[in-house]
Image (tube, rainbow, N blue to C red):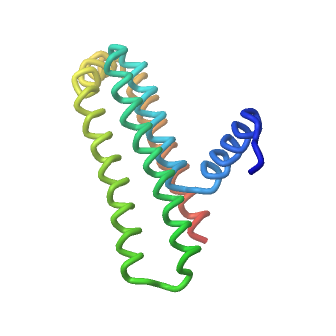
Amino acid sequence: MTRVSFTDSTFCAIKGLLRLFSGERNIKMQILISAIVIFSSFLLNVSNYYKLIIAVIFFMGIVLELFNTNIERLIDIISPEYNKELGRIKDSMAGIVLLTFIVAMIVSLFILFNKMLIFWNDVSRNIFLVLMIASNVVLLCFIFLAVYIKNKN
């Protein structure tokens, strides 16, 4: 058996992660949402303890998505034709990822809700800031819509 150096193993692991991150739409969306929520926790001045909780639960969701992606690819290699039982396995794996992500969103909302209310009360006194935030939200919606339409075609 050939021994592989630690450097080569690390390089292969990084290459594998980059391949997964670049090729999977769901992982990209989860990373984007995770980054927004984590960034929000910094903006809202949440305690480091809660920031850590938010980061860990989103990280676990992303790890599960990576695991799910590899399981699905393995199933597709083993059985290229449709198999009802393997389809159920793929569906249940996707359900586990979805459930984890929903829990991450609920926990984050629970942690950030009071801070968001306080922030909104402070911001709502400044109409310029409200308009700026609203225009950024509309712009983000247009960007997501454009990306969705582009990927649909």
Q: Residue at x 25, y 18 (%)?
A: 118
Seen from the viewer's position, the closer of residues 106 and 84 is 84
Seen from the viewer's position, the closer of residues 44 and 101 is 101
Name the quadrant of the C terminus.
bottom right
Check the image and report above or below for 43 versus 7.
above
Q: Which residue is drawn at 68% across and 40% down?
A: 14
Query: Can you give x and y, in whole percent of width and height, for residue 111 in the image?
Result: 26, 26
Query: Can you give x and y, in whole percent of width and height, for residue 122 in the image?
Result: 30, 15
Seen from the viewer's position, the closer of residues 1 and 116 is 1
Check the image and report above or below for 90 versus 1.
below
Q: Which residue is drawn at 66% across and 43% down?
A: 13
Q: Give the side of residue 151 with respect to residue 105, left or right.
A: right
Q: Give the side of residue 36 with respect to residue 91, left or right.
A: right
The tally of labels here is 0
Say which quarter of the image contains residue 151.
bottom right
The residue positioned farthest toward the front in the image shown: 1
Query: Can you give x and y, in whole percent of width and height, for residue 9 in the image?
Result: 71, 40
Query: Can you give x and y, in whole percent of width and height, for residue 121 in the image?
Result: 25, 19
Check the image and report above or below for 82 versus 2.
below
